[in-house]
Amino acid sequence: MPQAKSNVYARLKSILIPNMYYRDDRWPEGSDGPQNLAARESREATMGTKPISLKSISRESIPRALDKAERYRLLNEPFLAESICLDVLGADPDDARALAIYALSLADQLTQSEAPVKRALEAIAKMKRPYDRAYYAGIVAERRASAILERAGYGAGAVAWHHIQDAMKLYEEADKLQEDDSNDDAILRYNTCVRLLEAHRLSEPAHEPDDYPLE
């Protein structure tokens, strides 16, 4: 038995890699050695590769692309809708429909973070029609309120109340700017805000929203 163990150990010595030996063959002087093999292969794989860049879409594809963006919003995939809108706006920065869907897709993501607010408002500021600027800014304010109420942090009700008030003022402004008598979208959103106040029993807070560390 001791002789058998000795024979096995002798065979293993020629296979294991301590001291940079492998099957009795020493690694060449100055090489990376087996311990750095993965790192070396990674470097070789990335040498000469070009940076990944976005591809442009044609103006002719814009209507179809925006149809897809709207479907992604309906499927509760706002990030995918946002991505498509960015491609469309890259082809036509002034496309009104793209700006609207882009702002809405960012507003859809407010339940996760307040970060999209700035980009949404920047897109809304590029809209040419005063009605659109007021209406979509109202939606962003309303969605901020709903997201804050959903997160239910300290002072959520007070901060949400202020955002709802902002939304209602913007909807009133949009309704005054509306020239189409068949379009009462701003009124519908205004009434939603009233019901939101009632559902959460929100009333004017004693403090300003800056007093609450929510945003």
Image: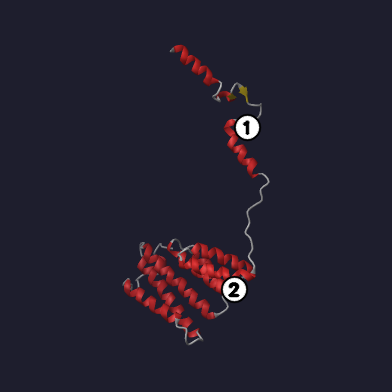
Colouring convention used in this rendered image of the protein: secondary structure
Nearest the viewer among 60 and 39 is 60
One can see residue 110 in this view: yes
Q: How crowded is mark 2: few (under 14 residues within 10 Å), some or many (20 or more)?
A: some
Considering the image in quadrants, where does the C terminus appear? bottom left
In this rendering, the answer to whether 205 lies above or below 52 is: below
Image position of 144 (left or right of 197): right
Q: Earlier in the sequence, mark 2 or mark 1?
A: 1
Q: Find residue 35 and report its horizontal and vertical position in percent.
A: 57, 32
Quick one: quadrant of the N terminus? top left
Residue that numbered label 2 is attached to? 95
Q: In the drawing, does residue 167 fall left or right of residue 37?
A: left
Say if residue 106 shows up in the picture. no
Badge 1 local density, few (<14 within 10 Å), some, or many (20+)? Answer: few
Q: Which amino acid does label 2 sit on?
A: Asp
Residue displayed at 40% across by 69% down: 145
Rounded to the nearest whole Å, what is the CA distance between mark 2 and mark 1?
55 Å
Q: Mark 1 points at which residue?
A: 32
Q: Which residue is drawn at 55% across and 74% down?
A: 97
Specify the amino acid type for callout 1.
Answer: Asp
Q: Are marks 2 and 1 in contact (CB under 8 Å)?
A: no
Q: Is residue 36 above or below residue 69?
A: above
On screen, residue 209 above or below 185: above
User: Which residue is pictured at 63% across the width and 68% down the height?
Assistant: 91
Is 140 left or right of 122, judged from the image as shown? Answer: left
Which residue of the protein is positioned furthest toward the right in this rendering? 48
Give how far across and how far down residue 49 sits, in percent.
66, 48
The residue at 48%/14% (across/down) is 6
Q: Could you say which disc has been placed on residue 78 in the image?
A: none
